[in-house]
Image (cartoon, rainbow, N blue to C red):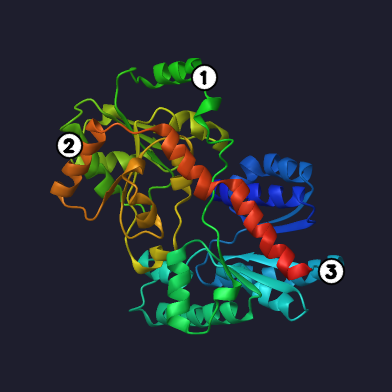
């Protein structure tokens, strides 16, 4: 809960569900450095919203053994908590947490498998597990079997995308349609709202960052590792410079700046035009508001069919058009609407130059983009969908 994903894709939903009268106990495993720096703040937020938080430290090393150790802790703690509080429902986010869900299912607790994507395939597609290695091949097969168990045991399944839901039904033939709800990564559109940002705030932050009023700013929000194609995004920026020679590339990220600068150096890009800023969640909208366009390229592999980029709804909530690639979750479906930005079908120079020309010449209506975000990615819609699932299971 102390990293950005927890703060954008877990806590806001739970606060909304708590407001609707659910009594919530939250078991999470935290990275030590984030827990030390933000644990107190997160605890106060959760406590003030009547959410009972049970944080534990995530075990990172040694690989494999650390995961087994954390699974054992999940099983023990989940059973102890249920013994004390007698839960009606256990909502498990992704595969590791679902070990606890299946255990409580045996105690007659309703189990929601909030799968978040095809996790085992993500580990392979992201080159975290090399299935040429006999050990990782065995681990992959183990979790694919677990995936089937979770799907079968779940009283309800949450998929981030319609594309993911279709893959589940097409490949299993077990008729899950009546117990799958599609809930994308929604955005807090009260936070990601350009109307909350004053001209004075934007002027002040621009001056601090050396951005002129007439500068064209391309932004990137979030991590640059594993799935996010930093070399290709830098190449796109280089193409953009042919049309806007002084365009700035703003990275809003916690990642090591040296990784970004190394990619810039490979293309002989002027580092002075690249701005890298770390931001707390409540600061992100202000930095995003400086953007003319926001960019994300995600590795277009099988597992990403089930992926819903959190940043997509947040960027659109600010009324900012996007540049992205095809083949990611339901993004293709949304980007057919050319009023939202530009989608590229490959990473050739010609494709990137064509997109770069479009974004520097075409005018986009922020209100159309905001309205699309409200329709499909509002946090309130996501909370209502989760509430509907909860009430179906505990009536």
The answer to which of marks 3 and 1 sits earlier in the sequence is 3
Q: Secondary structure at mark 1?
A: loop
First in sequence: mark 2 or mark 3? 3
Q: Is residue 111 left or right of residue 284?
A: right
Q: Which residue is mark 2?
A: 268
Q: Secondary structure at mark 3?
A: loop
Sequence-wise, the earlier of marks 1 and 2 is 1
Q: Which residue is mark 3?
A: 86
| 3D distance between C-alphas at marks 1 and 2 | 36 Å
Q: Residues within 10 Å of mark 3 (few under 14, many from 20)?
A: few
Residue at the spot 30% in from the left edge and 56% down from the top edge: 326
The mark closer to the camera, 2 or 3, is 3
In the drawing, does residue 71 fall left or right of residue 139? Answer: right
Residue 248 horizontal side relative to residue 207, left or right: left
The residue at 68%/43% (across/down) is 42
Tag 1 residue = 198
Q: Relative to residue 143, is residue 316 depicted above or below?
A: above
| Residue at image location 13% in from the left, 47% down from the top | 350
Residue contact at pointers 3 and 1, CB within 8 angstroms: no
The residues tagged by marks 2 and 3 sit, at their Cα atoms, a distance apart of 61 Å
Residue 225, compared with residue 274, is above or below; it is below
Viewport quadrant of the C terminus: bottom right
């Amino acid at each position: 809960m102390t990293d950005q994903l927890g703060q954008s894709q877990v806590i806001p939903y739970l606060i909304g569900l708590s407001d609707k009268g659910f009594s919530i106990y939250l078991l999470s495993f935290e990275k030590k450095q984030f827990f030390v720096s933000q644990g107190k703040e997160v605890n106060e937020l959760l406590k003030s919203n009547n959410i009972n938080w049970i944080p534990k430290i995530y075990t990172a090393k040694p690989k494999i053994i650390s995961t087994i150790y954390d699974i054992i802790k999940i099983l023990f703690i989940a059973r102890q908590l249920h013994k004390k509080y007698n839960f009606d429902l256990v909502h498990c986010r992704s595969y590791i947490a679902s070990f606890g869900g299946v255990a409580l299912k045996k105690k007659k607790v309703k189990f929601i498998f909030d799968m978040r994507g095809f996790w085992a395939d993500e580990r392979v597609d992201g080159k975290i597990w090399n299935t040429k290695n006999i050990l990782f091949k065995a681990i992959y097969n183990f979790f694919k079997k677990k995936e089937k168990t979770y799907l079968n045991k779940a009283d309800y399944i949450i998929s981030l995308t319609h594309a993911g839901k279709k893959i589940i039904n097409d490949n299993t033939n077990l008729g899950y349609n009546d117990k799958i709800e599609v809930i994308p990564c929604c955005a807090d559109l009260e936070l990601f709202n350009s109307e909350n940002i004053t001209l004075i705030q934007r002027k002040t932050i621009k001056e601090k960052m050396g951005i002129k009023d007439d500068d064209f700013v391309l932004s990137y929000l979030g991590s640059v590792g594993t799935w996010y194609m930093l070399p290709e995004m830098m190449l796109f920026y280089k193409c953009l410079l042919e049309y806007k020679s002084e365009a700035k590339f703003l990275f809003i990220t916690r990642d090591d700046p040296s990784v970004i600068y190394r990619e810039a150096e490979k293309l002989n890009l002027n580092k002075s035009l690249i701005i890298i800023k770390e931001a707390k969640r409540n600061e992100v909208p202000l930095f995003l508001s400086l953007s003319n366009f926001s960019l994300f390229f995600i590795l277009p592999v099988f597992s990403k069919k089930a992926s819903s980029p959190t940043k997509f709804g947040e960027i659109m909530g600010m009324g900012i058009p996007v540049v992205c690639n095809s083949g990611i979750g339901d993004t293709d479906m949304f980007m057919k609407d050319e009023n939202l930005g530009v989608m590229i079908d490959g990473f050739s120079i010609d494709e990137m130059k064509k997109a770069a020309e479009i974004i520097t010449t075409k005018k986009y209506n922020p209100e159309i983009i905001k309205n699309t975000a409200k329709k499909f990615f509002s946090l309130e819609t996501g909370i209502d969908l989760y509430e509907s699932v909860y009430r179906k299971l505990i009536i």
